[in-house]
Amino acid sequence: MGDIALTATKIATVVPLNSEIYTFIAGEAVTVGQAICIDPSTGKGILAGDSASLLQFRGVALNGGGIGQAISVLKRGMCYGFTVSGMAYDDLVYLSATSGNLATSGSVFCGRIVALSDPSLTKVMYVDADWLRTQI
């Protein structure tokens, strides 16, 4: 499983008006671009990972923050800043075993690689956090 690199300063939604973004309170330090889940005991956003206790992917952090600070989380929409040029169009994206990271393989689906409508067909990640799906 290969983790997908990112450039934190470039993490941003492609079409903000067509994106679904929510504000969570951080339960631990969060860096922009990290995968987020909800801590069931506190209701706060923490780093998600492909492990038994952190499977509920809720989205990607659009800003960083410390414990108790507000973080914006992209639940659904296209996102710049991930290094996906070497991936194929329509490849799936998953949670990594490393908390907070996304990967090219795994068991928890997080999105896929899509093309923008520019002449270069620039690849970006489409984040798709299904809050109703139960991960087991």
Image: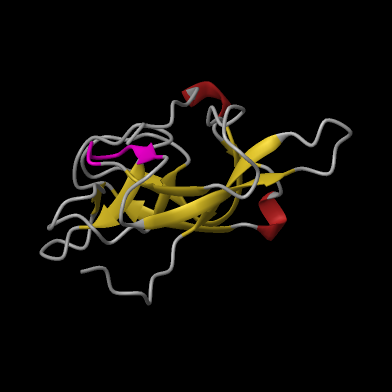
**Which image quarter holds the C terminus?**
bottom left
- Residue pictured at 42% horizontal, 40% vertical: 104
Please provide the residue range marked out in magenta.
Answer: 97-103
Q: Is residue 106 above or below residue 133?
A: above
Task: Tell me the quadrant of the picture where the N terminus can be found.
Answer: top left
Observer-nearest of 2 and 48: 2
Residue in the picture at 38% in, 45% down: 71
Task: Report x, y in % for residue 47.
Answer: 25, 44
User: How many callouts does the rendering have?
Assistant: 0
Q: How is the image coloured?
A: secondary structure
Give x and y (percent) for residue 31.
34, 31
**Magenta run includes residue 98:** yes
Q: Is 119 within the magenta?
A: no
- Say above or below: 58 vs 125: below
Picture quadrant where residue 30 is located: top left
Q: Nearer the viewer, residue 134 or 25?
A: 134
- Judged from this view, the residue extending furthest toward the bottom is 132
Please tell me whether the stretch drawn in magenta is mainly helix, strand or loop: loop
Between residue 94 and residue 42, name the one nearer to us: 94
User: Residue 90: horizontal and vertical position, in percent?
Assistant: 62, 50
Q: Quadrant of residue 63?
A: top left
User: At x 36% / y 32%, what residue is drawn?
Assistant: 3
Relative image position of residue 16 (x, y in whole percent):
67, 50
Q: Considering depth in this image, is 75 or 24 the residue closer to the camera?
A: 75
Quarter residue 121 falls in = top right
Residue positioned most to the right: 119
Give the left or right position of residue 124, taking residue 99 as reference.
right
Residue 92 as seen in the image, left or right of residue 17 = left
19 relative to 14, above or below: below
Q: On the rendered structure, is 83 left or right of 17?
A: left
